[in-house]
Image: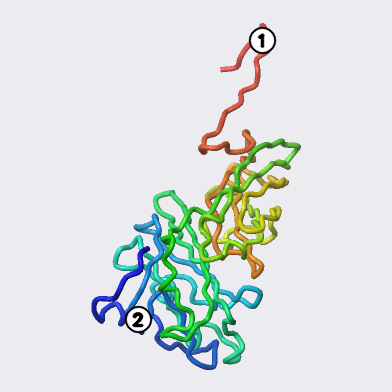
Amino acid sequence: MTKRIVLGAAFALVIVGLMAPSASAFCANSTTASTYNPNTLEYTFWHTNLTGPGTTLVGKLWTPGGQDVTGTCNVQSPTSNPFLYFGADPHNVGFSIDFANGCVGGTPGVICPGATLAVMATVNQVNAGVSRTEFLMTQVNQGSTGVNYDFSGLTSPPHNMVAMPRPRITSSSKAGSIVTAGITVDAANLGAYDGSAGLITGYNILSKLSGTDPGRTSAGYDAAPLANASAAGGGSASTSVSVDCTGGSPSLSRRWVVTQLVTANGPSPTVSEATVVSCDGSLAEPPGGKYKIVKPKVAPNSKKAN
């Protein structure tokens, strides 16, 4: 979104509330990161298309080449103190944290950002049978004017969230309970700003045998990836996976296959929309999400059962 100047105190009070102290600490001293700068009164928002019921925010913070500094308050909920928040316009997402007041234990001063702070922000929506996710990545070097990691000036181009690319099945075959599928993942770098595309190393392909969509958080899927597709800089990638349909009863008749973005500092906490591999009948969901039902041919002069 376009950089803006704060017109009044209400917005600043919201930011102060988000940075309020909690019981445990990361950094020994106050170390702030925000899309709002209290000295210049400038702020910016990141834009999402996902709004309405069932919409939540999940984030990841790390020092490129260093350690993860996310903590445990990365999920927006009524009882948490998240560092991502929706603006008055629900299409807008802001970011604010003081690492001295983080929701993680440990020795103060040990778990603290370094020269650069990278952010992955994701918006998940699960509502009325629809489950979607959008994300963006950005990074900024440490400064000292009003806020230590100042994201308020990162506005060009506008930081719009994009859908995490779902795996596309380009070929498939089945032998017993094993489906072997060729998978292509489209480029994710359209959601990476301010040089952060270089932090992406590839994609994990995760799956879950389930009768219903496991959702958009990685915790809902099997811990062991089916494959890792290398994609330096977040470009497109292809790989092959073997999907085990063992146990594919009528209630567990599908393998839900998703993309998980991977950086040198680990994988994303959220995953793409799912592509379905059917363990009962058709092999894989084609583009568009509709199955092509393949019926057995009837031999000449044979009788067809009714």
Colouring = rainbow
Relative to the observer, which residue lies in front, 20 or 238? Answer: 238
Residue 75 vertical placement versus 181 (above, below): below
For the residues labelled 2 and 1, the Cα–Cα distance comes to 82 Å
Q: Secondary structure at mark 1?
A: loop
Left/right placement of residue 213 relative to residue 225 reads left
Residue 208 vertical placement versus 300 (above, below): below
Q: Secondary structure at mark 2?
A: loop
Q: Quadrant of the C terminus?
A: top right
**Disc number for residue 39:** none
Left/right placement of residue 115 relative to residue 299 reads left
Q: Which residue is mark 2?
A: 40
Which class describes the residues within 10 Å of circle 2: few (<14), some (14-19), or many (20+)?
A: few
Position in image of residue 176 (x %, y %):
75, 38
Under mark 2, the amino acid is Thr
Which class describes the residues within 10 Å of circle 1: few (<14), some (14-19), or many (20+)?
A: few
Picture quadrant where residue 248 is located = top right
Position in image of residue 244 (x %, y %):
71, 47
Spot the residue most to the right: 175
**Disc number for residue 302:** 1
- Residue depicted at x 55% and y 37%: 287
Under mark 1, the amino acid is Ser
